[in-house]
Image (cartoon, coloured by chain):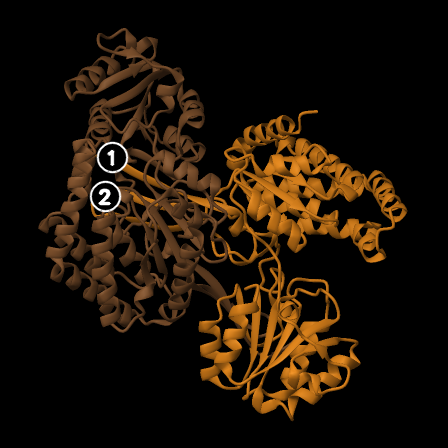
Chain colours: A brown, B orange
Amino acid sequence: MNTQQDVLAVAERARAASHGLALATRAEKDRALHAMADSLLAHQDEILAANDEDVARAETAGTPPNIVDRLRLTPDRLAGMAQGLRDVADLPDPVGEVVRGSTLANGLELRQVRVPFGVVGMIYEARPNVTADAAGICLKSGNAVLLRGSSSARSSNAAIVAALRTAVGDADLDPDVVQLVPGDSHESVKALMRARGHVDVLIPRGGAGLIRSVVEESTVPVIETGVGNCHVYVDRAADLDKALAIVLNAKTHRTSVCNSAESLLVHADLVDSFVPLVVAALQDAGVTIHGDAAFQAHEGVVAATDEDHAAEYLSLDMSAAVVPDLDAAIEHIRRFSSQHTDAIVTEDLGAARRFTAAVDSAAVLVNASTRFTDGGEFGFGAEIGISTQKLHARGPMGLPEMTSTKYVVTGDGHVR
Amino acid sequence: MNTQQDVLAVAERARAASHGLALATRAEKDRALHAMADSLLAHQDEILAANDEDVARAETAGTPPNIVDRLRLTPDRLAGMAQGLRDVADLPDPVGEVVRGSTLANGLELRQVRVPFGVVGMIYEARPNVTADAAGICLKSGNAVLLRGSSSARSSNAAIVAALRTAVGDADLDPDVVQLVPGDSHESVKALMRARGHVDVLIPRGGAGLIRSVVEESTVPVIETGVGNCHVYVDRAADLDKALAIVLNAKTHRTSVCNSAESLLVHADLVDSFVPLVVAALQDAGVTIHGDAAFQAHEGVVAATDEDHAAEYLSLDMSAAVVPDLDAAIEHIRRFSSQHTDAIVTEDLGAARRFTAAVDSAAVLVNASTRFTDGGEFGFGAEIGISTQKLHARGPMGLPEMTSTKYVVTGDGHVR
């Protein structure tokens, strides 16, 4: 089997199908999205049976229970996936939106209009719900999608994509706008990363290792997503009740997600007031604190290394340090942050202004938990991921971020 | 000499300097831009003497006269570079612009704000005026810039950058926001392309070979610019006078630029009416036509290969073909266009709508010369290049395209 050729072949079918999808009206696309939701429910038995195979294989292989849980589909989770597709149908169509426009001095009419990318490649890990989410968001934004999920979910993904493709065809769109990338091996991921000119953009979603390898090896343009070493800085002028609630929420509300906090910084003036409070509260919540000397004065706090300050734990661990002032906090964040989300807790307007201007992250929060950096929380309705790069899209990516633009210029025989 | 280390060292100085520049006010940046313009004129003698060295070296090496001409600076050209810097000062500051904003249901205040990229790398060919243009655009958009010009212009670029850095320092900004990349060899270009995490974005400007190598080898995110195989399609419903004027202007107004037309497509109904006219007019203007069978019926037309249909000639050559209908024209453009600029000449609204929707290029023109795809013509005031990729920016890039965004979210102790 020649993986490279197989991957280019599906990419070319996706390209051909994308031409029609780019011209589809919102009504046609919304009809397809509802058909896709209906089809997931109609094929529930096949999808759950396929998922049982994946779960059994994972359990036999000794996969940790939390990973098996992510892999598992239930009637409820499937209903959630179907509802997600209907929610995308309810969102406005980004394609055709006029971003800017004017009539030039010479009478030429200039419009910058949103258009689909064309063919999008998604490379993602265990959760099979991403398969339906990504297909829905790409279809609504006029993009054909090539889906390369985890091989541990291969039966589930195949069953889901089969159900979605049937629905797309029934809705009179070309089913090749939604395709699985053939091949289970890393070779198929490599082929996708080398398909420049065939695939317009690659979006990796998953752990830091996956994302780093895609970013470094891909010749296709990449949108980097989601690694989060998020900081909470408690300023001298913080309201300590708000600070305590925010630190606890940011760290413990859900530890496995990229917008949970991993690092705590506290102003030196609060060593005797806030530090004991926050150490006790975090430890009560089961958090292991990896602290600097000031934090290590408290029992149970273990010593932090530079690796701790840089870590995305995704667990009940948190690095912690005391800083002499706001500028030292900004310097620490510049050194260690993954530039996803960083927060300050302060009642001082000047400190808030300086922090939000100087910290160069996708989201900078004042007096709010880092957990708010999320497409749903921001009101975008659907989210394909959270970009941590500076090109194209930064922060939660909704439907408009899944488009490019073109200039349409209309004249009457204009020459220079 | 260790090129990689030297390049990373200048990148780190640029990073440190970029923090201050990102916070500079418009007034501070505009003062620096005027100081840079003044300094170019004050150092005219040194700059022209350095340029004489480059020109002499190029002539000794047998460089073609048109390339030597691009390299040559004169008092007039230097005055033009200074005026370009003052023009950038007159443009609005993109940094701090609120792109969107709202108050969420829970009272969180959300703003998406333009911010600089940080450190921009420019890799470009012969013309030394790009050195001042790029420095000005980057400074105004709050970015530190690493300049890697052609080694044939090394003395000129060194003298220009010295003059600019003096002015930046005199205007109380850190001179390290404008730096030359050390080293003349291809190793320094390679080091720049591998400086992921140190350089935020790379913009190559030059020939197709340079751009392709940067796109394929760089791990730093790239904005691809400027290769143009632009088409003019003359539809059945074209006004033939307008069509003739547009084809001639698009091909012959300036042949060496990316927005000149390289390919002509004519509807089959116009074989006896328009084709003889356009062949005669192009040949009168000195154009060699590389045509299909229908065009070869005319004397002096040479046979076109697929390479001709795909070529960016940048010379008085043009490929030409007759197509049976509009959809065949769209198919031909899909196959051969570089997706820079493609134009239709037609009085038929339906044909114009179908062409502008179906042709997936950075700019799609109706009844206008391809030469209009240009930041100056579009009213953007300054242009760093014309992007032919779909991520981030597409078409002429002005100051807003030289920025990223961040979300600033303000609450009052909000937790999830």
Q: Residues within 10 Å of mark 2 (few under 14, many from 20)?
A: few
Secondary element under disc 2, as helix, strand or loop, is loop
User: Is A87 above or below relative to A301?
Assistant: below
Residue B24 seen in this snapshot: no
Query: What's under tag 1, amino acid-wise?
Result: Asp
Q: Chain of mark 2?
A: B
- The image quarter in which residue A83 lies: bottom left
Q: Quick check: A316 left or right of B242?
A: left
The amino acid type of the residue labelled 2 equals Gly
Tell me: residue A105, above or below residue A349.
below
Please give the residue where the numbered disc 2 appears in the rendered image: B107
List the single residue furthest toward the front: A1
Q: CA distance from mark 2 to mark 1?
A: 9 Å
Residue B330 placed where, x, y %?
50, 75
Residues tagged 2 and 1 counted as in contact (Cβ below 8 A): yes
Residue at horizontal 37%, vertical 67%? A17
Q: Which of the labelled discs sits on residue A148, or is there none?
A: none
Where does the image place residue B172, in percent across and percent down from the top left? 63, 31
Residue position for label 1: B412
Tell which of A82 and B249 is nearer to you.
A82
Tag 1, which chain? B
Q: Secondary structure at mark 1?
A: strand
2 and 1 marks on the same chain: yes
Residue at the image point whose x is 41% and y is 59% from the top: A11
In the rendered image, which quarter contains the C terminus of chain A? bottom right
Looking at the image, which residue sits at the far bottom?
B272
